[in-house]
Image (cartoon, rainbow, N blue to C red):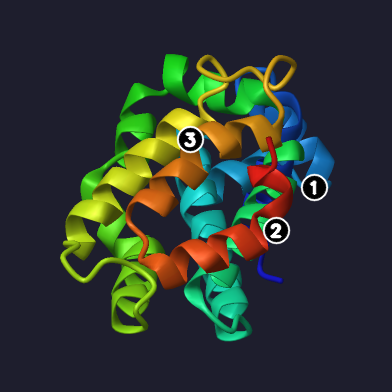
């Protein structure tokens, strides 16, 4: 592993574990066992390191999601397992990480929320198109609109201020947000698949 990738990996691990503001460049260098000079030769400051870290791990998550889709028998199964993987990752992230980005790194947060990135990294748009072709989603849907709306939903869903983890569990959130939306854009065939894969979450 090259030094830049090592730095990104170790630094990002510290950011998601402790929050961004609480981690210093000195701590990153110490964790890696490298000099501060080496660290600053690769990254001018913590902002630059954070930006590259987010982009690096976004690409990893995108690749992992694609792998899930390749091994799924239909788009609903793909959405289900991608969601399970995302929740597993979310539990590993300190809420301070997201809070710090929103409050103290507005430019970086704006870049994350940039609608151009919705299309650049989107799995959902691919899923919608495939779902329409397979008769799972309604054929009248506009994949681009659904894709943009889906990402806005995810931004709300992932916001710790909206849905604190100590107050709302995963099943309640799914039952009251994600599942009703999926049911609304699905055909009878799609609704049947949603009931199959999300059976636990849809029980009242």
The residue tagged 2 is: 6
Q: Report the residue at 33% width, 38% height from top.
A: 152
- The quadrant holding residue 69 is bottom right
Between disc 2 and disc 1, whose residue precedes? 2
The residue tagged 3 is: 177
Q: Residues within 10 Å of mark 1 (few under 14, many from 20)?
A: some
Between disc 1 and disc 3, whose residue precedes? 1
The residue tagged 1 is: 32
Q: CA distance from mark 2 to mark 3?
A: 38 Å
Is there CB contact under 8 Å for labels 2 and 3? no
Between disc 2 and disc 3, whose residue precedes? 2
Q: CA distance from mark 2 to mark 1?
A: 8 Å
As rendered, which of 51 and 171 lies closer to the eye?
171
- Label 1's element? helix
Q: Residues within 10 Å of mark 2 (few under 14, many from 20)?
A: few
Is there CB contact under 8 Å for labels 2 and 1? yes
Vertical side of 76 occupied by 22: above or below: above
- The quadrant holding residue 77 is bottom right
Q: Report the residue at 48% width, 25% height from top.
A: 101
User: Is the C terminus in the top left, top right, bottom left or bottom right quadrant?
Assistant: top right
Q: Residues within 10 Å of mark 3 (few under 14, many from 20)?
A: few
Could you tell me residue 16's position as x and y percent? 68, 35
Could you tell me residue 146's position as x and y percent? 26, 54
- Label 3's element? helix
């Amino acid at each position: 592993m090259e030094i830049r990738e090592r730095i990104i990996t170790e630094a990002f691990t510290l950011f998601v574990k402790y929050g961004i503001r609480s981690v210093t460049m000195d701590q990153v260098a110490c964790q890696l066992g490298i000099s501060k000079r080496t660290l600053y030769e690769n990254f001018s400051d913590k902002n630059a390191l954070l930006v590259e870290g987010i982009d690096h791990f976004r690409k990893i998550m995108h690749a992992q999601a694609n792998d899930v889709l390749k091994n799924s028998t239909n788009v609903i199964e793909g959405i289900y397992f991608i969601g399970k993987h995302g929740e597993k990752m979310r539990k590993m992230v300190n809420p301070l990480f997201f809070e710090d980005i929103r409050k103290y790194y507005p430019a970086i947060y704006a870049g994350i929320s940039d609608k151009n990135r919705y299309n650049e990294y989107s799995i959902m748009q691919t899923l919608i198109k495939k779902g329409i072709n397979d008769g799972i989603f309604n054929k009248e849907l506009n994949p681009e609109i659904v894709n943009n709306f889906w990402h806005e939903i995810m931004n709300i869903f992932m916001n710790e201020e909206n849905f604190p983890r100590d107050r709302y569990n995963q099943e309640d959130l799914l039952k009251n947000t994600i599942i009703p939306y999926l049911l609304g854009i699905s055909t009878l065939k799609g609704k049947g698949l949603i009931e199959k894969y999300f059976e636990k979450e849809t029980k009242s």
